[in-house]
Amino acid sequence: MGTARVVFDRWSGRYADRIAGVRSSAVRDLFAAASRPDMISLSGGMPEVSQVPSVSVAAAAHDAVVHEGAAALQYGSSEGRLQIRSLVAELMAEIGVRVSPADVVITAGAQQALDLLGKAFLDPGDVIITEGPTYVGALQAFSAYEPDIRCIPMDDDGMRVDLLEAELKRVGPQGAKFIYTIPNFQNPAGVTLSPDRRRRLLELAREYDIPVVEDDPYGRLRFEGGHMKPLRSLDDEVIYLGTFSKIFAPGLRLGWVTAPKPILAKLLLVKQAADLCGSNFAQVTAERYFLGTRWRKVLQNLTHTYAERRDAMLAALDEHFPDEARWTRPDGGFFVWVELPPYVDCASLLAEAVEHGVTFVPGDGFYPDGRGRNCMRLAFCYAEPAAITEGIRRLAEVVEDRLELYRAFIAAGAIEAPQEGAA
Amino acid sequence: MGTARVVFDRWSGRYADRIAGVRSSAVRDLFAAASRPDMISLSGGMPEVSQVPSVSVAAAAHDAVVHEGAAALQYGSSEGRLQIRSLVAELMAEIGVRVSPADVVITAGAQQALDLLGKAFLDPGDVIITEGPTYVGALQAFSAYEPDIRCIPMDDDGMRVDLLEAELKRVGPQGAKFIYTIPNFQNPAGVTLSPDRRRRLLELAREYDIPVVEDDPYGRLRFEGGHMKPLRSLDDEVIYLGTFSKIFAPGLRLGWVTAPKPILAKLLLVKQAADLCGSNFAQVTAERYFLGTRWRKVLQNLTHTYAERRDAMLAALDEHFPDEARWTRPDGGFFVWVELPPYVDCASLLAEAVEHGVTFVPGDGFYPDGRGRNCMRLAFCYAEPAAITEGIRRLAEVVEDRLELYRAFIAAGAIEAPQEGAA
């Protein structure tokens, strides 16, 4: 694509305000250049789809299209087929949420649901509340509607609800359009919102009358400990986003949203304008793939695989990373979040990391405001354990070299040593 | 969905300005109620997918997924797979447009491209120029970004370029964000922009420095006469939208956009925020379906089928419709546009038509400003010829009854007879 090159744009003054300033990031360009065969990727949040039996998917697609005939090939309803919405209702019941198919709209991955939420709710300047850091795709989707994004810090128990309360006091009742949270194995932080905080977050949302958006792509990818109740199971006004990308495959672009009916009706209206309807072809295939029980075994194996990779990453971090670094220890999902001393700029580290044959995502992309420069997101979902170990070793060298430099500066009094907790 | 019922919405004050006033139309609700088995639909623009061999599609999906393996199931690039973009370049070459795969972005049907264009170009109040009437989905997509839509009337040779010039004089150079046109077998009017007007439209667009968006879903569905050169073949700055929905099947939700590279880069950025990427699964299936030549025979048969249905509709209109009605005689595509005397309200006619067992789409939905109330769009794409004949006969009865009433009013001097050309 032309995005990586500088192209004279004679239309540069014509775009909408919302995107006139959007640029392809330097990081994206770097990744595009980083396709060396020995490169170890700790950057992309890609599921290990090689474990999804493509022969089963091929058979599901074949049988579904033959069985459904023209219905698989025709335009569909904007909300999605009743069959797949019923499947979603069953999947939701398994995690403790009771919804009917009429409470579900099928979307093009959960990403489309984020875009529809932004489009339905956000005028320029509207406040929304998210965790900080948060999912870069949510920031992209919401930012197109020019909101004022307030980020609430997390600790090992997820969003700091005390700080959420302070922010809600500032904005006041109905003072934010919604609170967006990824309670399970948060992207990028890897932390999980504790049961007590779930209840408190919902209390606060009720008190301040602000809708809660629960984005739950990783909830079923838990490695240890008990499953925690979704927010939606505790409060039926929560807007819940789910996806088939992590329990099946992202290549079909199937996700869903459940919400109170008036909100769902608005999302459906904006969805009609966005793509008329989703893909019946993908929906019939997913319906058939989820017949029987094989998908459960596949998901179980996938979860086991991700757990092994998480173990490999944490062990390698423990062994190789310097004392100045701190990182999270996720119980599931795809990601570890690493925090380095505040004077380290991870975006500039990335170029060196790529030279050393490893990629990660610098932390500032997960904030709307330039914070997170001293942080990095490491994905353990995609590389094999041995590659993860080697990747962390390579990355540790790069980090250590940089820290060595700063230690010399600090010793010379050129920069100040960070105070504990000052970051 | 809840859209058809009145549901108390405690969030009614919270939505974005762009959609707060959007309601599900009475027409949509009427269609939802109109599912009687003997109902003849002249309303929906649905392709006759029963002629697309589902066994071939099933085999294409099966073989593609087995062959491509994980690539079919994984996240894809935002612009789409190189293979399907190469296929699009070949399809474009067949209609006289030379583009490279790098000039193509795959979208979720052409509808997504309309939404991306709106998002990339339109601030509230921006002027855009369309034909009047125009595609209801384009109005929906653009309206979400609150533009000022100026509609240019058509005649049998398509958009009146003299009236376009007058409008351009009003808005001035760069005074509109783009001109949106459906040059071939326009939806809903069924008319085709003549070669002379194509050249003139492009001259005017250059003179006033306003981008042209060419939406061409029906271009390959020509029943007679020579294919006309796409605008894009005459001017490489034209933004061209294509779709697989009419040459293959809408159920895969595959379309494309070609545009100058800087514009394409912006569309790609907004697409990333909208859905991350399209469906690799659908793309590999389409790539395989278009291997070999069978699709050409299928398309040829489809075109023949639509031509027969067009013939049936025009013959029935000639036989049954009253003298006061005028209608277009399309050389391809899906639609005939009927104009009744200005005192006839087609939205109110629809309820009677449904009682008589036939549906159509009232014309006012194809204008942004309430015009078109005395018009109707009739789709000949989906019903069998015999059903079309019967449907037009039923509809003619309803129209005749209404006109009879008005003739009595006119005879009594209660309303004025329309002047020739006054409509």
Image (spheres, coloured by chain):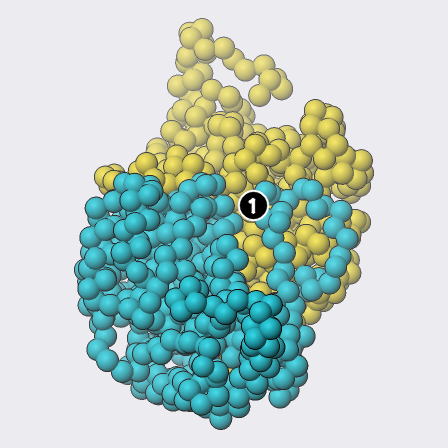
Chain colours: A cyan, B yellow
The quadrant holding residue B175 is: top right
How many labels, in total? 1
In the rendered structure, the answer to whether residue B105 lies left or right of residue A83 reads right
Foreground of the two, A298 or A188: A188
Foreground of the two, A24 or B271: A24
Residue under the point 56% across and 75% down: A411
Residue under the point 79% across and 39% down: B206
Farthest residue toward the bottom? A386
Foreground of the two, B159 or A57: A57
Q: Is residue A227 visible?
A: yes
In the rendered structure, the answer to whether residue B23 lies left or right of residue A90 reads right
Q: As shown in the figure, which amino acid type bears the numbered disc 1?
A: Arg
Residue under the point 50% across and 67% down: A342
Assign a secondary structure to mark 1: helix
- The residue pinned by badge 1 equals A18
Chain of the residue on which disc 1 is drawn: A
Residue under the point 25% across and 44% down: A209
